[in-house]
Amino acid sequence: MLWPVALMLLLGLACLNAVAQAQPGTGGKGDYYPLLPGTRWEYRVQVGGETKGSITEVVAAIETINNLPLARLESQVQGKVVATEHLRATPQGVFRHRAQGSEVKVPVPVLRYPVKANDSWEFDTSIGQERVKGKVSTRFEEVEVPLGKFKALVRTSALNWLVSRCKAPSGSPRDRQGQANARPRRRASRIGTGEIHSGKTATITELPTPFPCARGGE
């Protein structure tokens, strides 16, 4: 997913009393992140309260990489793929194994099972030459979408990118040790269950960029 950015995803949700009743990733009732091929999510994109367009996320295929079946999630803008990631669902949670084609050295838990409010966890991993540290927390709240009001699982993450090398604006390389930006990248997402999780409207507060070095080059 486009995770080094501040996002607010408001997804339609089903009831919370069936959280642990489905096999993870199969799309059954209580599955907070179905990863069946063809599953898709439609988001409205808002910047500063103004709608700027839409983003579609699609589970494009199941691919075997390093002997593991991984779901390839594509983010699309106007039909063009702008980002990819590879996810895997297990009884312990949903894990990100690859981002933009690069291996995540230590798979990052996107969601941890069993899902519960006031849960939190930290992670420390590397994607290519970039080190990423962060903390994720969850809570429940009620959200309103075009289909109505639903209980929601809210997942918030704060990320620090430790960039080993970027290009200066002039194009000459420079070393950058420490944080890629002065403040952590934050992301909050409302994740839903079952059939209502797929194909409903959401809000994103900021258009994503693939990596913290994107504006200055890689």
Image: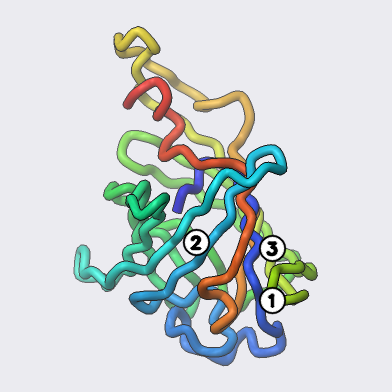
Q: Residue at x 42, y 74 (%)?
A: 39
Q: Which residue is mark 2?
A: 109
Q: Nearer the viewer, residue 51 or 63?
A: 51
Q: Amino acid at mark 2?
A: Pro
- Cα separation between marks 3 and 2: 15 Å
Local crowd at mark 1 within 10 Å, few (<14), some, or many (≥20)?
few
Residue 80 percent location from the top left of the image? 33, 50
Q: Secondary structure at mark 3?
A: strand
Q: Nearer the viewer, residue 209 or 211?
A: 209
Residue 164 percent location from the top left of the image? 37, 26
Q: Which residue is mark 1?
A: 147
Q: Amino acid at mark 3?
A: Val
Q: Is residue 105 left or right of residue 215?
A: left
Residue 105 in sight from this viewpoint: no
Q: Nearer the viewer, mark 3 or mark 1?
A: 1
Residue 181 percent location from the top left of the image? 55, 26
Which is nearer the N-term, disc 1 or disc 2? 2
- Cα separation between marks 3 and 1: 18 Å
Q: Residue at x 50, y 67 (%)?
A: 41
Which is nearer the N-term, disc 3 or disc 1? 1
Which is nearer the N-term, disc 3 or disc 2? 2
